[in-house]
Image (spheres, grey):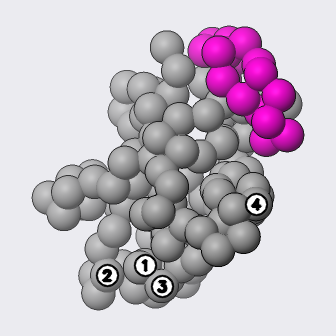
Amino acid sequence: MGRNAAGSLIEDMPGEILEALKGSSEIELTVKGRASGRDIPRPVWFALSGDGRSLYLIPASGRKTQWYLNVKQEPKVTIRAGRESFTADAVELPQERFGEVVDAFRAKYGKRDIERYYPDIGKDDVAFEVRVPS
């Protein structure tokens, strides 16, 4: 069981969640505000791992991104794609895995858009992994 963005318990439906993720260009990422303690939703780009067991997140402005700072304090996040949602921990990936994450983003969104919307790639390489419920 997980919680939806409103905090209500939901039953995870892995197949439906994975299909919703595959059909989405962005997700709603909800983090806990480090100062306010409130749930803060925001749309973000993501990429799925090759096996579909994880999704990857890259903060657009690296370590200066507000949701990055919030996740560092409280790693539990809620992911919503369409009508499906789940709650899991966002785990910061080691530097040596950053290349595979960027490759997944480029494959999904194209090199030009990644360079345009993620200007700190190559300067501040940080990414997170969130496991999709199985």
Labelled pair 3, 2 in contact (Cβ < 8 Å): yes
Kindly identify the amino acid type of the residue bearing the numbered disc 2: Asp
Measured in 3D between alpha carbons, the distance from the residue under mark 3 to the one under mark 1, in whole angstroms, is 5 Å
Residue beneath disc 2: 124
Q: Does dot 4 land on a helix, a strand or a loop?
A: loop
Q: Is residue 50 visible?
A: yes
Q: Earlier in the sequence, mark 1 or mark 4?
A: 4
Residue at the extreme left of the image, as rendered: 96
Residues tagged 2 and 4 counted as in contact (Cβ below 8 A): no
Per the model, the C-alpha gap separating discs 1 and 4 is 22 Å
Q: In this view, does 46 lie above or below 130?
A: below
Boundaries of the magenta span: 1-17
CB atoms of marks 1 and 2 within 8 Å: yes
Q: Is residue 75 left or right of residue 30?
A: left
> Where is residue 76 shown, x and y percent of the image?
54, 45
User: Residue 121, how many percent across, how many down?
Assistant: 36, 79
Instruction: Estimate the spatial distance between the alpha carbons at disc 3 and disc 2, rounded to whole Å.
Output: 9 Å
Question: Observer-nearest residue: 40 or 29?
Answer: 40
**Mark 3 and mark 1 residues within 8 Å of each other at the beta carbon:** yes
Instruction: Please state the horizontal and vertical placement of residue 58, each as a whole percent of the image.
Output: 46, 64
Which SS class for mark 1? Answer: helix
The circle on residue 38 is: 4
Quadrant location of residue 86?
top right
Q: Which amino acid does label 3 sit on?
A: Lys
Residue occupied by mark 1? 62
Instruction: Of the two numbered discs 3 and 4 on the same chain, state the one appearing first in sequence.
Output: 4
Q: Earlier in the sequence, mark 3 or mark 2?
A: 3
Q: Looking at the image, is mark 3 or mark 4 nearer the viewer?
A: 4
Cα gap from disc 3 to disc 4, whole angstroms: 20 Å
SS at circle 3: helix
